[in-house]
Image: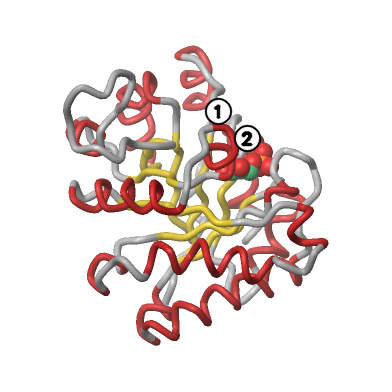
Amino acid sequence: MRRKLIAGNWKMHGSLADIGTFVDGWGDASKVDADWLVCGPFPYLPELIKRLVPLGIAVGAQDCSAQASGAYTGEVSAQMLADIGVSHVILGHSERRAYHQESDALVLAKVKQALAFGLTPVVCVGETLVQREAGETDAVVVAQLEAIIHALTDAELQQLIFAYEPVWAIGTGLTATPEQAQAVHARLRASLAERSEALAVEMRILYGGSVKAENSAALFAMPDIDGGLVGGASLTAQDFLAIGHSME
Ligand code: 13P
């Protein structure tokens, strides 16, 4: 059975002081039946690993290079992330697709690098408001998903997590209704099932886009929503933990 995952994406937020405040504010998560993950900015990953892993929170990055190593100034390789103890990496986030022109092909190359070094890729898909209003949601997200899954083996696919993040719901306070999100998650799972029923049953698909404690219980109660990828509400321990407690 799929276990829920509550994943935070700190984006370009936080400081060493904020990490201390987060750790001090973290409470008792023992009753929350879910895995926890925080994806932090590169410079803070060692500190996050030192302070959060003992609390039962895995630590991920928000991107990695599509290259293995070499003369790529400013890039961070999957091997380096694995070397310091990072376990997950968000790939294909809509902010990277939009601001860094990341194509499906580039996201795939990054996924392959992550897999080669044992990192769990959290691959994001999602439609813009224009695409939703044009009735293109399913076509857009399925194309993004299939660009990745077609190029990987079943064994590689077993290592993946997907996240459905409607672009219009990110940081806007607009959340997809549980029914809207469920419909897309079910469509994504159907695409996975065309590849392999077993894979579709096992694959965790997170929802992201203005998730907070006030809406998480209803979203996570949907049959194909396996947790959340949380931006703003992952920045404080109280808000983040409250999302877990909302499931109790
Ligand atoms: P918000 O939760 O701030 O809308 O961000 C969602 C997101 O992009 C997580 O990756």
* Colouring: secondary structure
Q: Is residue 155 above or below residue 31?
A: below
Which corner quadrant of the image does residue 57 belong to? top left
Q: Residue at left 62%, top 52%?
A: 208
**Residue 241 in view here:** no
Q: Is residue 184 above or below residue 113?
A: below
**In the displayed structure image, the side of residue 165 where residue 76 appears, left or right:** left
Q: Nearer the viewer, residue 171 or 26?
A: 171
Image location (x, y in percent) of residue 133? 82, 61
**In the displayed structure image, the side of residue 157 where residue 147 appears, left or right:** right
Judging from the image, what secondary structure is the residue with disc 1 in?
helix
If the image is split into quadrants, where does the N terminus sit? bottom left
Q: Is residue 194 above or below residue 148?
A: below
Image location (x, y in percent) of residue 29? 50, 47
* Kind of residue at disc 2: Gln
Instruction: Specify whether tag 2 is near ligand 1 (CB below 8 Å).
Output: no
Q: Residue under circle 2?
A: 238
Q: Earlier in the sequence, mark 1 or mark 2?
A: 1
Q: Residue at left 63%, top 70%?
A: 139
**In the displayed structure image, the side of residue 146 where residue 81 appears, left or right:** left
Which corner quadrant of the image does residue 159 belong to? bottom left
Between marks 1 and 2, how big is the CA–CA gap? 6 Å
Q: Quadrant of ligand 1?
A: top right
Q: Residue under circle 1?
A: 25
Disc number at residue 105?
none
Q: Residue at left 51%, top 77%?
A: 189
**Residue 147 in view here:** yes
Judging from the image, what secondary structure is the residue with disc 2 in?
helix
- Near mark 2 (Cα within 10 A), the count class, few <14, some 14-19 or many ≥20, is some
